[in-house]
Amino acid sequence: MPPPVVCNATTLKEAGTCTGRLVGTAIGVNHLSNNQLTSIAQAEFNYITAENEMKWSSLQPSRGNFNFTNADRIVDFALQNDMKVKGHTLVWHNQLPGWVQNLTSADEVRQVMTDHIKAVMDHFKGKVVAWDVVNEAWANPNDWVNGQPTLRNSVFYQRLGGAFIDEAFIIARETDPTVKLYYNDFRSEAVGQPKGDAIYEMVKGMVERGIPIDGVGLQAHLGLPNDKPAIEDIIANMQRIADLGLEVIISELDGHLCDGETFEEQGVRFHDIAKACVAQPACTAFTVWGIGDRDSWLNTWDELNCMGRRPSGLLWDDDLNKKPAYEGILSGLNGK
Ligand code: XIL
């Protein structure tokens, strides 16, 4: 193995370019009118995920009626600024309209899933470089059986069984042979996490069966109620996925401070993950889930019980000043 590159870049995207990784953030259509946020996005990132605008409920709120307006605005912003786009997400139990959740036959679910994947991927063909084809198919611990992870009881699973995952990837590959196809999930970043182990076994099986999957997204929403795994265990998980010939990307990083973690400790934790990505050739992209703490989705989590303060899980503070989390990730992306 060649020695890892060490760079001295002063922005996240330049550091990622120097060490060979895309550096991304999530952005919502409501952020596009905020000049401070768009300036930071332009200066620091070269990879964009739409925070909500490419989800099923946004794109096909009623059967056969597609609305691409908001998603297109985000894609236009990205392409005008030389950023790449990851499509997020085709098949997910959440932000899924009631008309899909209420389908009762396997044939209908298969038809509707096929139609959605084809219409959405065709629309964005040539404009996105990758898709999260299936998101969060594994259940949360309360729903596991005897402590063993199970697939989530979504309408897709209920009507098609676990084979819906293979089917979704096959349809996606037929629709666009040129984009990367990812499976994306949370609380599964590390070896030893039950969901991490289950997802590893699942994607290993997919590779063995010749299912067209290109990689695994580790969301990395790290902090209660999710785990904060040890960095060695994240590195080992990235390596075992890489050993299958797959990419392994950090797809939605944030990590709240509600357990009393300091800004500095957060900076170290984020640094270690960025550095792990740069040290792993299969880690082609590193995305954080937003820009400023003020606009983070973590603020909507009442159950975090953050003692009246913000969860503060991102790289810029409430006034959009850079935090130690920013400096940590910059140095990690520089390979330091
Ligand atoms: C979140 C968005 O950030 C919120 O604005 C929205 O209300 C809910 O979804 N995993 C995912 C993302 O894959 O799509 C989620 O985004 C965060 C968890």
Image: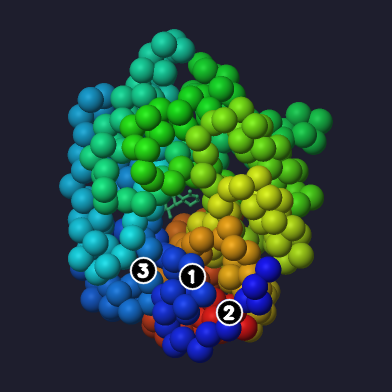
Q: Going by the image, does 197 lie left or right of 42?
A: right
Determine whether the beta carbon of the residue marked 1 sits less than 8 angstroms from the nearest atom of ligand 1: no
Q: Which residue is mark 1?
A: 20
Q: Is disc 3 surrounded by few (<14), some (14 to 19) or many (20+) residues within 10 Å?
A: many
Given the image, on which type of amino acid does mark 2 rest?
Val
Question: Is residue 48 in view?
Answer: yes
Q: Residue at x 61, y 35 (%)?
A: 207
Q: Which residue is mark 3?
A: 46
Whether tag 1 and tag 3 are in contact, CB under 8 A, the answer is no
Given the image, on which type of amino acid does mark 3 rest?
Asn
Q: Please state which of residues 133 and 288 is positioned toward the viewer in this rendering.
A: 133
Question: Marks 2/3: CA distance?
Answer: 20 Å
Mark closest to the chain's N terminus, 1 or 3: 1
Q: Which residue is mark 2?
A: 5
Compared with 131, 328 (above or below) is below
Mark closest to the chain's N terminus, 1 or 2: 2
Marks 1, 3: nearer the viewer: 1
